Image: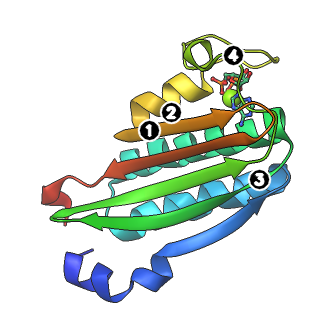
Amino acid sequence: MSKEILENNLDSFNERLPILNDRDIVNIRSKGRKFASDLGFRNQDQTLIATALSEICRNVIEHAGKGEVIIKSVIIGKKIGISFIVKDNGPGIKNLDRALQFGYTTGRGMGVGLSGTKRIMDEFELETKQGVGTTVTMTKWLNEFEY
Ligand SMILES: Nc1ncnc2c1ncn2[C@@H]1O[C@H](COP(=O)(O)OP(=O)(O)OP(=O)(O)O)[C@@H](O)[C@H]1O
Ligand SMILES: [Mg+2]
């Protein structure tokens, strides 16, 4: 998608969705993939982006109970990207450094969600406070030749 078309359609690239159950994750995953496809990400990147998004949303269900996600496009200067803000009011993450390590889990997972997602996305920020909640903000940029 060209930058001009995107700038004129910014409203259609901003959606807020609740994260309450597994069905929501499936829906969010396919919405994220569609957004990525509309923006011009190639197939392989669409899959990676959808995986990153669903991992972080699955963490909300598994470790915080419920939350919400904003899926949107971002334009900064010449750059176009897809951005996700995933928010919950759960228990927060006690030891963030460890949580970000490959293989660390406090649950029954493989402990690869956060570390894998960080590797997939170009920008990854995690804010967490015990008893208050967790917010993950992440962005993947399109390569310039893709638009
Ligand atoms: N939203 C969250 N709220 C509270 N704790 C979280 C949240 N997301 C992650 N964590 C903590 O960080 C740890 C690491 O998360 P990560 O996604 O890497 O692994 P996992 O969810 O345990 O397993 P996997 O994602 O491989 O199934 C979790 O075990 C959990 O303790
Ligand atoms: Mg996980």
Q: Is residue 130 visible?
A: yes
Residue 110's disc is 4
Q: Position of residue 126 (x, y in %)?
A: 54, 36
Q: Is mark 2 within 8 Å of ligand 1?
A: yes
Tell whether label 4 touches label 2 (CB within 8 Å). no
Q: Is residue 121 visible?
A: no
Residue occupied by mark 1: 124
Amino acid found under the numbered disc labelled 1: Phe
Farthest residue, direction bottom: 8
Q: Quadrant of ligand 1?
A: top right
Distance between the Cα atoms at labels 2 and 4?
A: 13 Å
Mark 4: few/some/many CA within 10 Å (<14, 14-19, 20+): few
Mark 2 vs mark 4: which is more N-terminal? 4
Amino acid found under the numbered disc labelled 4: Met
Residue 133 falls in image quadrant: top right
Q: Position of residue 39 (x, y in %)?
A: 35, 67
Mark 3: few/some/many CA within 10 Å (<14, 14-19, 20+): many
- Describe the element under mark 3 as helix, strand or loop: strand
Amino acid found under the numbered disc labelled 3: Gly
- Describe the element under mark 2 as helix, strand or loop: helix
Distance between the Cα atoms at labels 2 and 1?
A: 8 Å
Q: Nearer the viewer, mark 3 or mark 2?
A: 3
Mark 3 vs mark 4: which is more N-terminal? 3
Amino acid found under the numbered disc labelled 2: Thr
Q: Position of residue 67 (x, y in %)?
A: 77, 53
Q: Nearer the viewer, mark 3 or mark 4?
A: 3
Residue occupied by mark 3: 67
Tell whether label 1 touches label 2 (CB within 8 Å). yes
